[in-house]
Image (cartoon, rainbow, N blue to C red):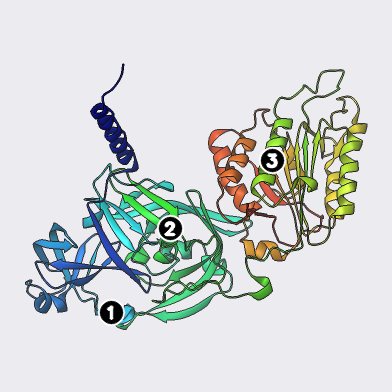
Amino acid sequence: MFLSKASKLVCLLTMLLGCIAVEGQAPTASIPFKLVKNQIVIAAKVDDSQPLNFIFDSGSGLTVMDKKHLGDRTRIPQVNDFLRTKNVSLRLGPHSMKIKNVYSYDMSFLTESIGISIDGIIGYDLLYKYVVHVDYDRSVLELFDFGDSPEKGNAIRFSLKTSIPTIQAKVILSENESFDDQFFVMTGAGTHLDLNGPGANERDLINKIGEVSSSQVGEGNRKMVYLEGNVEAFVFGNQFISNLPVGISTSKSGIQSDKRVAGILGNRVLKMFNLTFDYLNNKIWFSKNSSYKDDLIAEVAKPETSIIDPIANRNSESKNSIEPSSNYYGVFIGINDYLDEDNVLVDLESPITDAKKLMQLLINKYSFDLESAFLLTNPKRNEILETLEKIADKVTENDHLLIFYAGHGIWDDRLNVGYWLPSNSTSSNKSNWISNSTIRDYISGINSKHTLLISDACFSGSIFKTRSGDLKGLGVYNSTRLKSRRAITSGNIAPVPDKSKFMEYLLKRLEQNDSEFVSAGQIYYQVREAVINNTLNAPQFGVIQNAGDEGGDFVFVRSND
């Protein structure tokens, strides 16, 4: 059938309109904002007043106006603290809306600390009526009707506590200690992460946040002592932020004394993401923006009113300083086929494919190259050891080595020893097995800056010997300074399946990573959560004991191609 020109034009317009619909609807309103000392300040008119300065705070369950400004800047008479005025008209640019209840309060302390006149605060009254998109890159607040908003980034579910969005997160205090709890998400908090007093006291956090300093903040009856330190990492959704500054409030009242949550995630972290608040579906979308950093080692915790400081110049010890003369070496071992005549060691399906996929991914996306990558398929014992000898001759003290093993593993309860099983292993004779102590000796002897072993095999966690795997995920700056000898394993001292969920998620996380630098600890934690949620196995990460580890970590560096 042939179409007329008019019909073709209609079809073309229909296709174009369909494409526009797929991209999402235009916002109901676009409201420019200024980020002033970590506060989102928007202009609004109240009942045809002159433009007034409102702070947008996702932690505000009420719309509040400064009682001192009501009479001279609006038609609303000046009233006492927290008296309610009903049915106020609020105009945001060309968009107007009715606010059922507006409360009055003395906000002079905000005006003094921020440095500009602050007339009001709004939060929940916007968030429950619209999907609110906070674009820090463009400095614009966009309001969408429910169902029409952009959905970009990592979606994290939240619950509402006293009209404040609350998310689940993990605080990693050290390599051996962490805790999961709930945190308020508050764009009006000018901090990184505040830990509420009751939970901080119960967990004795003052002794677990590194070197602690104290200061007084606030004025008059709002004055309190503020304790400052940092935690090793803060994890929420798929986000992993290292060396996060934290504060501990000593306030005996108000939101920082709330026992229902562990603390407050503030705007000095939130502003590294473009945010979409969807109260209908109880989701916040976090999309990394141009100011994103995964390591905040140079930040300070104190809730200062200044905009977040850039990372300090560290000269040769910059967080971005992977030695320019260093090389990345990789040994990728996959064993599918076994020569065991007793057929106890059955053939496997996936190890060679997994080894090839990992090698190809690291060459294509990271700072590995083909000349420094060694792929061993179905190797015998001597071939594995000869390759490690060859690597030992090549690697220098600034280089980085990754060893990957996928194949059978076994644990000897009598000798308390774990083994790799090369292709020429037999179940009745250990002469061709490779013990963990042999692997450890090679890792110790190879003179690299960082060595990472990734083992996807039964009983692979036995490489840690008497020390269990830990949750340590160092920031990039700390990771690169110190030598490391670490391992990520698909399980502990237990069998793992041939069809490896561990490898599925490891490859997926490395492929999806868009940070220039990512440490092994950061990758591990993302993989661990996915594996535990979908299998009976628990991956491990930790130090290979007595192999020369000094506290650093292996860092994957994205290539510039």
Label 1, residues with CA under 10 Å away: few <14, some 14-19, many ≥20: few
Residue at the image point whose x is 21% and y is 50% from the top: 129
- Classify mark 3: helix, strand or loop: helix
In the image, taking residue 561 as reference, residue 28 lies left or right, namely left
Measure how far apart labels 2 and 1 are at the Cα level: 25 Å
Name the residue beneath numbered marker 3.
360
Q: Position of residue 33 (x, y in %)?
A: 30, 66
- Residue 496: image quadrant is top right
**2 and 356: which is toward the camera:** 2
Q: Position of residue 143 (x, y in %)?
A: 26, 53
User: As shown in the figure, which amino acid type bears the numbered disc 1?
Assistant: Ile
- Whether the residues at callouts 2 and 3 have beta carbons within 8 Å, the answer is no
Residue at the image point whose x is 9% and y is 77% from the top: 71
- Residue 270: image quadrant is bottom left
Instruction: Single out the residue that lies furthest toward the front.
Output: 5
Name the residue beneath numbered marker 2.
273
